[in-house]
Image (cartoon, coloured by chain):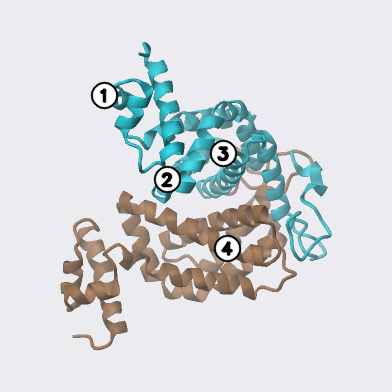
Chain colours: A cyan, B brown
């Protein structure tokens, strides 16, 4: 029997992830998770509101970390570079939670009902980033727009990271933001954008890596 | 009594919007809407699955319109400009539905439970745009990233448009995409970005309008 609260919580989380993978999310109950972890159902509910929260409980912590990370970027760093710097600074925490992130990715992919919770989480993170950008002097209009765009890019990077166990969070964030710059960088001669990338079907003259100097 | 199906549908929609504004969304039932429209509850359910769908039924049509609009953009237009062109081409349809869009905006702002539906709608639109970008030759990775970023920007513009009855959809889309370009355009001398805009608190040297040549 686990003694400390933190130990019980870790065991419950591990048990939940195992069961979601083995049986599927819908076929797993809080009681199942408690039994697998060797604790009572009451202990489960002391740590998590329901079986869904086992997957999402790190969210509040991540938002606080994001707010701190953005506040730590020097004032003279422009908005896109500031977001990139903040997102990169979260790499150690993200890599430490990779197992949970991967499991959440698998469970959400297999459980459409969880998708709404994931979208709400992304919206809350965008609001956190917008607040951080307003604190850097941006107008409400710009802060909201840039936060939505920046967190959409972050979400894309995190999705790719959780889908590939060999992928590196920091590398994906850097590559995603480099692609963002390519997207927005107008070609002065009006030729097709250089952003079509390696998977393109009709354009082959450029590659996403050809402007590494834009990365940061 | 309305004769045609289309007439009944329009009356139901108008009645629903009136009631949502008068009583609030939660306090309105499908039967209330039918009564106000002068039709039976059965007629209501022939047109809408539930009272929520009165607000969201245009969604499927909008996605088809978006797919067509993107497909109509010439192949040699780069991704960001292609999205801007497609989004701008939807202006007549958007302006024609302004009353519904404004009502939805008010109801969603007052009804947190509808926010999830709105987020799911945005995710579905991003998937439609991603499919359109893949059809233009972009890789899956680029198409998904650019679609998420582009629809985040579009959502920002639509939100501002529905919140201000005097605002012009096309103007807001153009300004939003201009701001996107400013966000990504690195300042060669490393000075603060020019994007902080009119609402900024600490920076006043630039304005979002100072690079109009980037707009399209």
Pointer 2 residue: A120
Would you say A85 lies left or right of B190 here?
Answer: left
Secondary structure of residue under mark 4: helix
- The mark lying in front, picked from 2 and 1, is 1
* Horizontal relation, residue A121 to residue B141: left or right: left
Q: What element carries label 3?
A: loop
Picture residue at 77% right of the left edge, 64% below the top: A192
Task: In the rendered view, tell whether residue A129 sits above or below residue A41.
Answer: below
To which residue does mark 3 refer? Answer: A137
Residue drawn at 31 percent across, 58 percent down: B107
Quadrant location of the C terminus of chain A in the rendered image: top right
**Which is nearer the N-term, disc 3 or disc 2?**
2
Q: Are marks 3 and 1 in contact (CB under 8 Å)?
A: no
Q: Quadrant of residue A24?
A: top left
Give the letter of the chain under mark 1.
A
Q: Is residue B155 left or right of residue B15?
A: right
Q: How far apart are marks 1 and 4 (CA)?
A: 46 Å
Depth order, front residue of B100/A28: A28
The secondary element bearing badge 1 is classed as helix
Mark in front: 1 vs 4: 1
Callout 3: few (<14), some (14-19), or many (20+) C-alpha neighbours within 10 Å?
many
CA separation, marks 3 and 2? 26 Å
């Amino acid at each position: 029997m686990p003694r400390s609260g933190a130990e019980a919580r870790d065991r419950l989380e591990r048990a939940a992830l195992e069961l979601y993978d083995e049986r599927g999310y819908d076929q797993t109950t809080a009681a199942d998770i408690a039994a697998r972890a060797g604790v009572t159902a009451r202990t489960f509910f002391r740590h998590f509101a329901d079986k869904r929260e086992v997957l999402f409980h790190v969210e509040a912590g991540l938002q606080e970390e994001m707010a701190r990370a953005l506040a730590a970027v020097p004032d003279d760093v422009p908005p896109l570079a500031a977001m990139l710097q903040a997102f990169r600074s979260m790499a150690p925490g993200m890599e430490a939670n990779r197992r949970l992130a991967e499991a959440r990715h698998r469970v959400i992919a297999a459980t459409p009902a969880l998708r709404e919770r994931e979208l709400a989480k992304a919206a809350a993170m965008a609001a956190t980033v917008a607040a951080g950008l307003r604190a850097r002097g941006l107008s409400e209009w710009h802060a909201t727009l840039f936060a939505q765009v920046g967190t959409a890019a972050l979400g894309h990077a995190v999705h790719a990271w959780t889908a590939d166990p060999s992928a590196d969070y920091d590398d994906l964030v850097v590559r995603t933001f480099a692609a963002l710059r390519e997207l927005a960088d107008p070609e002065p001669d009006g030729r097709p954008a250089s952003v079509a990338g390696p998977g393109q079907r009709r354009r082959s003259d450029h590659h996403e890596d050809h402007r590494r100097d834009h990365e940061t």
